[in-house]
């Protein structure tokens, strides 16, 4: 089934001039590793559900990832911590731990729109000093496997076309939705 994505959108960033794109993984997802809660490529890499003890570190990574020109956002540690606590109320939060250091996270809303069908990556970030090393791809693969196992139909997320992440998602062969549109009206 092709989802109707023409409404109910969110966008990152307050620069509303940025175009936004909705990426939907429509091809079948290969189950590289069927274990739901532990993904290891090497002995030293783990992806697991976050606990409250992880929030401070996640908040730090969040701040570093999104206080950037490309997103037009300025975050403080207090704000990101607050955001993680809000996300934790309705999202699954995962952390990437490499050599015992937390280097990334993802927050996924498993109840986007139709319950049990769309897993929506609300936030994903790899610590800037660990980007471009393949961790983001492994985290995404893990998320795909995790929700595929739970019988979800789609992994979805939005990203600004101007963000570096956009090129990475294209490289990873995520497909852009051709039917949906992000509607908006500037309020101030
Ligand atoms: C987006 C993000 C999670 C990706 O994680 P990452 O660890 O940097 O990405 P990876 O190293 O796993 O690379 C993923 C793919 O992008 C490719 N890639 C890297 N830089 C690229 C570039 N400039 N152009 C095109 N592709 C690129 C990699 O080659 C890889 O694809 P491949 O394995 O098929 O070769 C991470 O960069 C990040 O946290 N960015 C800041 C926060 C952000 O933008 N979050 C997303 C908001 S929607």
Image (cartoon, rainbow, N blue to C red):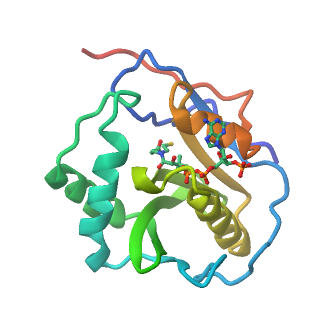
Can residue 23 be seen?
A: no
Give residue 17's position: percent from left, percent from top. Answer: 43, 15
Q: Quadrant of residue 138?
A: bottom right
For residue 18, above or below residue 173: above
Horizontal side of 36 relative to 70 (left or right) equals right
Give residue 80's position: percent from left, percent from top. Answer: 24, 53
Q: Quadrant of residue 3?
A: top right
Give residue 22's position: percent from left, percent from top. Answer: 62, 35
For residue 169, above or below residue 107: above
Horizontal side of 101 relative to 113 (left or right) equals left
Instruction: Give the residue at x 64% y 81%.
Output: 36
Q: Nearer the viewer, residue 76 or 154?
A: 76
Can residue 97 be seen?
A: yes
Horizontal side of 113 relative to 66 (left or right) equals right
Instruction: Give the residue at x 27% y 54%.
Output: 83
> Quick one: which residue is furthest to the left in this view?
78
For residue 31, above or below residue 80: below
Q: Nearer the viewer, residue 111 or 106?
A: 106
């Amino acid at each position: 089934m092709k989802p109707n994505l023409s409404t109910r959108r969110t966008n990152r960033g307050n620069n509303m001039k940025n175009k936004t794109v909705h990426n939907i993984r429509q091809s079948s997802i290969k189950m590289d590793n069927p274990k739901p809660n532990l993904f290891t490529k090497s002995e030293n890499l783990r992806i697991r559900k976050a606990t409250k003890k992880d929030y401070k570190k996640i908040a730090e990574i969040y701040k570093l990832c999104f206080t950037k020109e490309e997103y037009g956002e300025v975050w403080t540690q207090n704000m990101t911590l607050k955001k993680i606590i809000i996300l934790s109320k309705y999202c699954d939060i995962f952390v990437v731990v490499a050599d015992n250091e937390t280097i990334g996270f993802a927050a996924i809303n498993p109840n986007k729109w139709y319950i049990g069908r769309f897993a929506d990556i609300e936030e994903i970030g790899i610590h800037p000093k660990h980007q471009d090393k393949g961790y983001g791809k492994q985290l995404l693969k893990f998320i795909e496997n995790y929700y595929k196992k739970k019988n979800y139909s789609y992994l979805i997320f939005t990203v600004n076309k101007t963000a570096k992440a956009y090129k990475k998602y294209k490289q990873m062969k995520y497909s852009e939705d051709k039917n949906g549109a992000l509607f908006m009206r500037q309020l101030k």
